[in-house]
Image (cartoon, coloured by chain):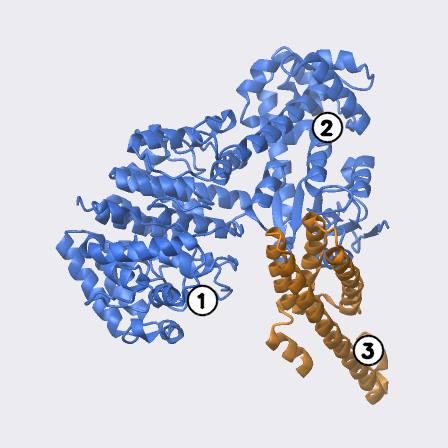
Chain colours: A blue, B orange
Amino acid sequence: MTVENRKGGFVGGDEGSRDPFPAGMRVLAVDDDPACLKILETLLMRCKYHVTTTNQAITALNMLRENRNKFDLVISDVNMPDMDGFKLLELVGLEMDIPVIMLSAYSDPELVLKGVTHGAVDYLCKPVRIEELKNIWQHVVRRKKLEQMDQHKSLRNVGDHTVTKEGGHATSVGTDSDLNGKVSRKRNDPNEEEEDGGEENGHENDDSGSQKKPRVVWSPDLHRKFVAAVNQLGLARAVPKKILDLMNVEVLTRENVASHLQKYRLYLKRISNVASQANLVAALGSKDPSYMRYGSFDGYEDFRAFTGLGKLSTTSPSSYSYNGMLGRLNTPTGLGFRGISSSGLSQPNQLQNSGGSTDYMGQLQSQGAINPVSNLFGGVPTKLEVNQMHLQNKLISYQELKAEDPVTSRLANKLTNQPMTTTSSSGNSSLVTVMSSHFLQKNRIKPSVQMGGLHFEPVDAGSSDIMDQSQCSDIWNVCTAQNSKPSPINIPMPLSSPLNNFQLPLNGNFPLSTSSVRDSHIDFSSNAVSGCNDDSRHDIACQGGLVGTSNYTVQTVDYGQSSRSAQSVTPAGGFVGQDIDHQGTAFCNRSSDIPSGVQLSPAVIPADVLNLKGGISSFDSNLRSDNYLPEQSKIQEDEFFQGPFEPLDELMNAVIKREYNDGVLLDGDWWLAGIAVSVLPKVLRTVLNSHALPTG
Amino acid sequence: MNRLLALLFHQGVLDEQFLQLQQLQDESSPNFVTDVVTIYFHESEKLLRNLRALLTDRDFSDYKKMEIHLNQFMGSSSSIGARRIRNVCVAFRAASEQNNLSGCFRALDVLEHEYCYLKNKLHEYFQMEQQRAIAAGARYPMQQHNRTEE
């Protein structure tokens, strides 16, 4: 049954042109579930959009095809009986180039990834909240902006003869048949921008001053002819002029064909990327050309070589694809992220906010990650932006780590390369995955990934762990800072698992209690491997260190712990940086052999806190915040701690002492627990500047 | 909020999403909640019947098909705010992914049970709301026309 109705509800008229944007934006909602559809419709109307609904994808396509200008945005469910949501997404992108938002009851990373690779601008999870819908207009604006930028760019780039002719199809100039190969190569990155522009420019590009051609609708028939022509010519030889001749359609101009060819190429590339991603696990070392472009793969390879990390575990395909995906995402938004290549280690030239270049790392080193950091916290992150921030975060931590020895580099590597680690990776990955999960959180990605597998490799290595610790704390700081804005993300993972992983690495004192660490490490890894910790003791242990999960600032949120509770006081809620090795280990110690002298502080102190002597005082005050107590009470496995505050004091003392003993000179400013976002840049600056890394 | 609803919240049968639905109800869509819930019940019964039919079919092997139904059921349940039902769906899905037939059966049983419970309670709730509206109208006949919006 087709349900079609149109509800405007506002003065704006059909075009909605009189409504102040974003009100009046025309949305097409597609969902086969009538209850959801009705709810979605009402929600959208409440946001003051013009809503049209249908429960059939085919109807939706027809509506879109009949008048491309009729809608600004499409929201579509993923699972529909008559057509796969992704297919619809692709078709809309190919033919109409309207932003499409995916909607689904599940938010598996694979699905989200699929959505992104098929060109969705966003991926929402049911139940949809009105807050999320209130912001979707940004995708429309962004696309329009890109198109305009695109037009200007191509106008500038274009040679003479096409300018006047092109007018509304400025961007398609780039694929002028003569320059076809060259230009498409040259404009690899901007290609995606152009793809957006495509044929849309016709009605928008008034400035170019030339004729406005009526928009060509690529009907399925037409497209079929096009594909046939392309296949006949062979993709390599397919130039717009020849295609046009083969198709023999009068209305089409070469420019129409050119821009459509561009899109088609991208579409094919996307498909092949999806396929290649699927093969990534097996082909870990292989170089996927599409990734090369983004450099992330390169970076990874180089990095591996550089660090000689033979035992880096296989990054799951998702991580690569994630990188590539991010790269892709980044491209349209002007991010020139070139991945984390070892070349990045060489000194940078300029620090670019948008997660720029290979220089990034060097820049960070030299200047401190101020810009990226500030960028991290600006505004409401959209998915794309979050991805950027994510990348930047990774870069920051990465570069911090990279600055030091290979061990830390390992950590960094893990961090950057495993946003969605599903398998247990070698030791360092714990920190990384933890961090990654942060990012994922931010991205509203709900990884059903096991956080397990966070083995603390440095433990095994047994050396230079201090540095790892500090580095970890840096990363930690970055992550915590980033996560200071809680977003209720439910990670189906049990808390204990990630926490476990968490605890171990982040300690400057790590080397001190190597044995206990090792023990805990062992326990830890086993726990980690199991992923979900059903071991109550273990859980307890972790939670012991972690203060009421709900209050766990960053971690809590990240790990979903069912915690919709805001991240309360960071330090209190915060996961006690396992602070230190022994404390952490004590927590993780399944065998309840808590090393003597281990102050089990129920409060979870972010690792970074622990590392910072200077921060301790502030930490103290934070710890004594109210949140600490409630959380404290939550952790009733009293075997592990002696009481709310005493252990904390002892802990702090121990930390301080140890830090002094170890010669770990950590800048007091580092301590991030509870630090407001605004403080972070300063903190990071200090961190970066101090380079207080133990040489141990 | 009346006590029945509070009870349902407390039991975890409903969650905040249901509140959101209630907030969406206003003059322009006065019966929004009841409409949506009615649609939900209608669809859910169909889905549950399909699921039951699929599972009891002796030649059942196509878990994918079941997952499609399950997907929709889960989506609409979470959109309504039927948290417990949604949780059961999650477990159901897990069992289905492991091709665990008996697990699926168990989950389906629980699902049906939860669904019945929810349906009864919501019916009850709507009736109470209706009576309240009527009573309010009767009590304040002068403001009748205002009350009719409820």
Q: Position of residue A412 (x, y in %)?
A: 34, 41
Q: Is residue A485 visible?
A: no
The kind of residue tagged 1 is Ser
Which chain is home to disc 3?
B
Numbered mark located on residue A94 in the image = none
Residue A127 position (above or below residue A98): below
Q: Secondary structure at mark 1?
A: helix
Question: Do the dots labelled 2 and 3 sit on one chain?
Answer: no
Q: Earlier in the sequence, mark 1 or mark 2?
A: 2
Q: Position of residue A416 (x, y in %)?
A: 40, 40
- Residue at position x 58%, y 31% in the image: A275
Q: Position of residue A227 (x, y in %)?
A: 73, 21
Query: Residue at label 3?
Result: B146
Q: Secondary structure at mark 2?
A: helix
The kind of residue tagged 3 is Asn
**Cα distance in 3D space between marks 3 and 1:** 44 Å
Q: Secondary structure at mark 3?
A: helix
**Image depth: mark 1 or mark 2 in front:** 1
The outermost residue toward the front is B58
Residue A273 position (above or below residue A251): below
Query: Residue at label 2?
Result: A202
Residue A481 position (above or below residue A195): below
Query: Residue at label 1?
Result: A550
The kind of residue tagged 2 is Gly
Quadrant (top left, top right, bottom left, bottom right) of the C terminus of chain A: top left
Q: Using the image as rendered, state which of residue A673 and residue A640 is in the foreground.
A: A640
Which chain is home to disc 2?
A
Q: Are marks 3 and 1 in contact (CB under 8 Å)?
A: no
Question: Do the dots labelled 3 and 1 sit on one chain?
Answer: no
Q: Is residue A513 visible?
A: yes
